Amino acid sequence: MIVDERIVTFINSLDTKNSEILETVEREALATSVPIIRREMQSFLKTLLLIKKPMRILEVGTAVGFSALLMSEYAPEGCRITTIENYEKRIPIARENFRRAGKEEQIALIEGDAAEVMKQLEGPFDFIFMDAAKGQYIHYLPEALRLLPEGGVLVSDNVMQDGEVIESRFAVERRNRTIHARMREYLYELKHNDALVTSIIPLGDGVAVSVKQVPEAGRGARQSKRSEPAECGAAAEKRKGQEAENGKTS
Ligand SMILES: C[S@@+](CC[C@H](N)C(=O)[O-])C[C@H]1O[C@@H](n2cnc3c(N)ncnc32)[C@H](O)[C@@H]1O
């Protein structure tokens, strides 16, 4: 857990209930150890959807359909959701959940590997929710960028890998080093790609919210790409001292 457990418990204690079908699907998913979005992420998604009001949503990683159903309740009327899943055991359960909720018309489940499926999709999708294999996000990104229109929103869940992403690669178990390196690369790309403006938020297991922009639109065209890391502490003090001596203070 990357956020103090008591804070999360307190925030979640303020939550109101979801619809009956969401409560049921969530209960069933948790009882069968299917990973679904956490309570605090649920609230965040609802809020983002009510702000953005997307008419076409793409979800990467359906599991048993919980988050797709949640999004269908908070997106505007007429919004279509496409969701991708490749684990054959979960696909019939997700379909059944969409049927139980009466959402078969609104939610289209595509079976297959997201990397392949995304290449076949035609955009635009004005909201993309990335919630599949964390080590693959970096590979999905070019397609996500192709599918998003200007102003489109990309939400990537679980980007902190239970906090492991901040560790040096040597502190990470050897078998987790590839996924660790790929997630770092993904986060770097989200923050440095001129087509995106991204905020990484320590919510749940870490969520990145990115908005696609047209690079020429400016906003500094990402000076950070070339700039030195921010100076702090002793180094900054030393530099200021030297500048003062040279009469260069501003
Ligand atoms: C965390 S779960 C999704 C949870 C779901 N979004 C929810 O909150 O209700 C991630 C899902 O992504 C699926 N997945 C992983 N890699 C995938 C891939 N390459 N293509 C399609 N689905 C994939 C997994 O099988 C798993 O069911």
Image (cartoon, rainbow, N blue to C red):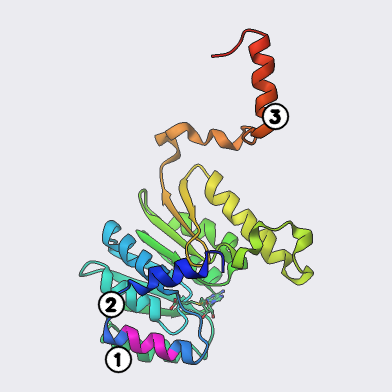
Residue 167 lies in what quarter of the image? Answer: bottom right
Work out how far the residue at label 1 is from the one at label 2, CA to CA, in angstroms.
13 Å
Q: Residue furthest left?
A: 77
Span shown in magenta: 22-28
Say what amino acid the circle numbered 3 marks: Ala
| Helix, strand or loop status at disc 1 | helix
Residue hosting label 1: 100
- In the picture of the structure, the residue carrying the numbered disc 3 is 235
Q: Choose mark 2 or mark 3, whichever is in front.
A: 3
Q: Which of the numbered marks, if any, corresponds to residue 119? A: none
| Picture layout, residue 128 above or below residue 24 | above
| Image quarter hosting the N terminus | bottom right
Classed neighbour count for the residue bearing mark 2: other residues with Cα under 10 Å, few (<14), some (14–19), many (≥20): some
Question: Which residue is pictured at 62% across the width and 60% down the height?
Answer: 183
Q: Which residue is mark 2?
A: 106
Q: Is residue 27 magenta?
A: yes
Q: Is residue 92 above or below residue 227?
A: below
- Compared across the picture, whether 188 is left or right of 126 comes to right
Residue 120 visible in the snapshot: no
The reply to whether the residue tagged 3 has its Cβ within 8 angstroms of ligand 1 is: no
When the figure is inspected, residue 231 is found, relative to residue 112, above or below; the finding is above
Q: In the structure shown, which secondary structural element does the residue marked by tag 2 occupy? A: loop
Left or right of 181 on screen, residue 189? left
Amino acid identity at mark 1: Arg
Residue 159 coordinates in the image, percent (x, y): 55, 62
From the top left corner, tell me how far across and down residue 6 is, in percent: 48, 69
